[in-house]
Image (cartoon, rainbow, N blue to C red):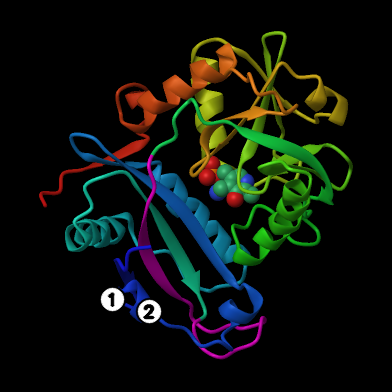
Amino acid sequence: MKNYYIYYNNKYVRQNDATISVLSASAQFGLNVFEGIRVYKEDFYYVFRLDDHLKRLNNSLRLIGFDIKVITKKEFINILRELIILNKIDTDFSIRFTYLISEIDSWSSIKRPTFFIAPLIRKRNSSETYKTMFLTKIRRISKNAMNPKIKCGANYINGRYAMLEAKSKGADLPMLKNKNGYISESSGACVFLVKKGLILTPSLDCDILESITRDTVIKIFSDSNYKIEERLISETEFKESDEIFLCGSAAEITPINLIKNNNFKIGVTTKFIFDEYQLAITAKKYNMYSWTTKLDVKL
Ligand code: PMP
């Protein structure tokens, strides 16, 4: 990976020069909260759903007990502009925006967290790319033990165990059920099923992250009068669905091939949402929602 400039501790530094103590609460216990935000480069740079990412990060900060508010949108955009220029980024990329405790401390730390904003080069998905999936025995963490609504580093270790199980079965990605045995989410993305024209997705009480892309997908489908149900989904319904796709800022729209089929073809409903999502992220459609923040940066 290229040694890009990042913004860390109120300075622009090379990624390799941004250090934290090995005994810090973040390095040792995974104590951090973060967002992964996409920027798409066309005629301008389009940041997708920035307000919603900042809002969710504020929520995560509060829920994990960090007594601090996220920087303002204006401050964020100024830093982002500078990072685009310093790194001469002329393509799609993703931003990791993370609050962490960089000094030696316990998991119960109440120190003031610092933050970094780091660009990572990420191209948008092609509809030809699909993933295989395995329904794991590992269950999704639940609200009363480790709230999945908080986008915290340590929560991803649950996804790691599920991913290890999926990989051991030859699949690319895991699907996790929640503690009650209902379909929940994948390790870093939410799921949608299509059955006989009806679109289904686990409701927000199924131990899922309140995914911003899930919200985008629901709005796009509703605008085209598709029938959507957000509810509890059984393992049988999952296995008997006609189409499955994942969604997330990183996953975008990822078609799923559940039963390993070498002649897999993307389903019509998945193709529809894939194409509409591409239009949404670059402000070619759905502008009434103000999902994109347009930046004009000259390199
Ligand atoms: N679930 C989990 C566990 C995730 O890590 C992500 C990625 N942030 C998602 C769902 C999708 O969320 P979003 O659409 O907000 O990126």
Residue 78: which disc? none
Instruction: Label 2, secondary structure: give it.
Output: loop
Total residue callouts: 2
Q: Which image quarter is the N terminus in?
A: bottom left
Query: At x 57% / y 19%, what residue is drawn?
Result: 266
What amino acid does circle 1 point to? Val
Residue interval drawn in magenta = 102-123
Classify mark 2: residues with Cα within 10 Å, few (<14), some (14-19) or many (20+): some
Q: Amino acid at mark 2?
A: Ala
Q: Position of residue 133 (x, y in %)?
A: 71, 37
Along the horizontal axis of the image, is 36 left or right of 186? left
Q: Whole-percent x and y of residue 159?
A: 70, 54
Determine if the magenta segment contains residue 178.
no
Displayed quadrant of residue 237 = top right
Residue 4: percent from left, percent from top: 30, 66
Question: Are the residues at dot 2 and dot 1 in contact (C-beta closer than 8 Å)?
Answer: yes
Task: State the residue at coordinates (79%, 26%).
Answer: 238
Residue on which the image places disc 1: 13
